Image (cartoon, rainbow, N blue to C red):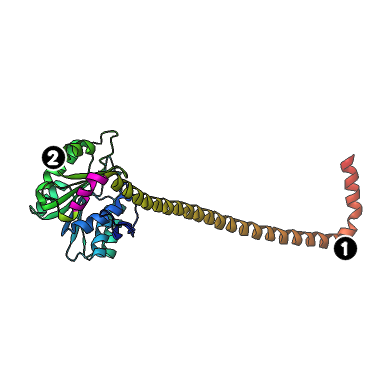
C-alpha cells in the first residue's frame, strides 16, 4: 500500500466532467492540493471551458469544504493563445455551475483587472493563473493579484513548460522560483506551485519530500495524469465513432426514403404499363381493329414503296 505523503486516495479521483482542455492531466494533483491546502476561497484567472474550475469545485464538494467558494474569472471570448470562441462556451459553463455547483462556483465575467476590486487583500487561499501567456501578461496578473493572497496563500501557474511562440510563463516562473518555495511539474504543458509567503502546513509535506523525491513525485503525477488523459482520448474517440454512426444512420434513412420513393414510382409505372397493355389488347380485340386490317396492310405496302 502506498504511504508516500504526496499521494492520497483523492489523487485517484476522476473528474466527473471532461472538457477540451490543456489542463486535463493535472486533475489528480489538483485534488491532492485542495485536500492539502483546504482553501476557503479559490480564484481562477482564465477558465475557458471550465475543466480546472470544475475540478476545484468537485474537490470542494467531495472533501466537504463547507463555505469554500471557487471563483472563475474570464471574458469567455477567448484570446490569441486559447483561440476565440462563441457564446456557447460560457453558456455551457454556466449551465454546469447551475446544475452541479450552485453552492460553490461563482462566475465573474469580464477582465481580470476590472474584477480585482471585488477581492479584498488577504482573502484568497488558492490563486490559479491561466490567462494570457505572454511574459508581460502573466507577470501583470501575478503582481496585480498577489496582494489578495492570505498569509498562507498558494499560487498555481499553468503552461510553465511551454516555450513556443510568444509563451512567456516559463520565463516568469523561472524568476519566481528563485526566491520562493515552489515545485514544478513538466507534464501537461507544465504546472507550477508557488508559496509567496508562508508555506501552508499541508503543502510543506510536498516541498519537504521534493528535496529527495522530486523526480518520483513528478513521475507519479505524470502517470496519474496520463491515465486521465487517456480516458479523455477514449471519450473523444467514442464521440467521433458516435458522430460517424449518426452520419451513417442519417445516410441510411435518406437512402431508405429515396428507395421507398423509387419503389413506389416503379410500382406506379408497372401499374400504368399493365393498364396500357390492357388498353392495347382491348383495341386489338375490337371489331373495328379487325375490319381495318386490310387498310393497315395496304398502308404498310405503301410505306415500304
Which quadrant: the N terminus? bottom left
Q: Quadrant of residue 3?
A: bottom left
Q: Is residue 111 part of the magenta span, yes or no? A: no
* Left or right of residue 245, residue 42 in this image: left
Q: Main secondary structure of the magenta part?
A: helix
Q: Nearer the viewer, residue 176 or 92?
A: 176
Q: Nearer the viewer, residue 58 or 4?
A: 4
Is 209 part of what is drawn in magenta? yes
Mark 1, residue position: 287
Q: Residues within 10 Å of mark 1 (few under 14, many from 20)?
A: few
- Left or right: residue 210 compared with residue 283: left
Q: Quadrant of residue 263?
A: bottom right
Indicate whether 281 appears above or below 297.
below
- Quarter of the image with the C terminus is top right
Residue at 25 percent of width and 60 percent of height: 59
Quarter of the figure with residue 168: top left
The residue wearing badge 2 is 179
What is the C-alpha distance between the residues marked 1 and 2?
A: 118 Å
Secondary structure at badge 2 equals loop
C-beta proximity under 8 Å, tags 1 and 2: no
Label 1 vs label 2, nearer the camera: 2
Where is residue 68 shown, x and y percent of the image? 18, 62
Magenta-tinted stretch: 203-213
Give the x, y percent position of residue 213.
27, 46
Amino acid at each position: 500500500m502506498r504511504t508516500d505523503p504526496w499521494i492520497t486516495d483523492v489523487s485517484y479521483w476522476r473528474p466527473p466532467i471532461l472538457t477540451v482542455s490543456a489542463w486535463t492531466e493535472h486533475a489528480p494533483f489538483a485534488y491532492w492540493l485542495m485536500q492539502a491546502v483546504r482553501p476557503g476561497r479559490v480564484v481562477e484567472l482564465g477558465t475557458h471551458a471550465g475543466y480546472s474550475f470544475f475540478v476545484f469545485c468537485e474537490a470542494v464538494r467531495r472533501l466537504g469544504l463547507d463555505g469554500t467558494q471557487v471563483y472563475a474569472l474570464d471574458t469567455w471570448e477567448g484570446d490569441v493563445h486559447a483561440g476565440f470562441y462563441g457564446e456557447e462556451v460560457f453558456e455551457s459553463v454556466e449551465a454546469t455551475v447551475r446544475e452541479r455547483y450552485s453552492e460553490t462556483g461563482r462566475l465573474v465575467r469580464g477582465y481580470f483587472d476590472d474584477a480585482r476590486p471585488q477581492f479584498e487583500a488577504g482573502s484568497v487561499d488558492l490563486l490559479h493563473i491561466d490567462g494570457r501567456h505572454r511574459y508581460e501578461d502573466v507577470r501583470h496578473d501575478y503582481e496585480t493579484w498577489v496582494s489578495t493572497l492570505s498569509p498562507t496563500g498558494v499560487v498555481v501557474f499553468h503552461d510553465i513548460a511551454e516555450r513556443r511562440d510568444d509563451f512567456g510563463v516559463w520565463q516568469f516562473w523561472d524568476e519566481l522560483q528563485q526566491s520562493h518555495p515552489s515545485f514544478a511539474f513538466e507534464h501537461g504543458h507544465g504546472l507550477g506551485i508557488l508559496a509567496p509567503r508562508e508555506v501552508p502546513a499541508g503543502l510543506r509535506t510536498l516541498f519537504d519530500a521534493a528535496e529527495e523525491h522530486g523526480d518520483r513525485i513528478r513521475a507519479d503525477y505524470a502517470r496519474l495524469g496520463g491515465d486521465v488523459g487517456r480516458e479523455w482520448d477514449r471519450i473523444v474517440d467514442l464521440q467521433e465513432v458516435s458522430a460517424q454512426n449518426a452520419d451513417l444512420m442519417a445516410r441510411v434513412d435518406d437512402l431508405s426514403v429515396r428507395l421507398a420513393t423509387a419503389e413506389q414510382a416503379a410500382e406506379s409505372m408497372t401499374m400504368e404499363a399493365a393498364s396500357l397493355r390492357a388498353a392495347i389488347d382491348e383495341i386489338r380485340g375490337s371489331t373495328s381493329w379487325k375490319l381495318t386490317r386490310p387498310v393497315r396492310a395496304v398502308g404498310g405496302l405503301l410505306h415500304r414503296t
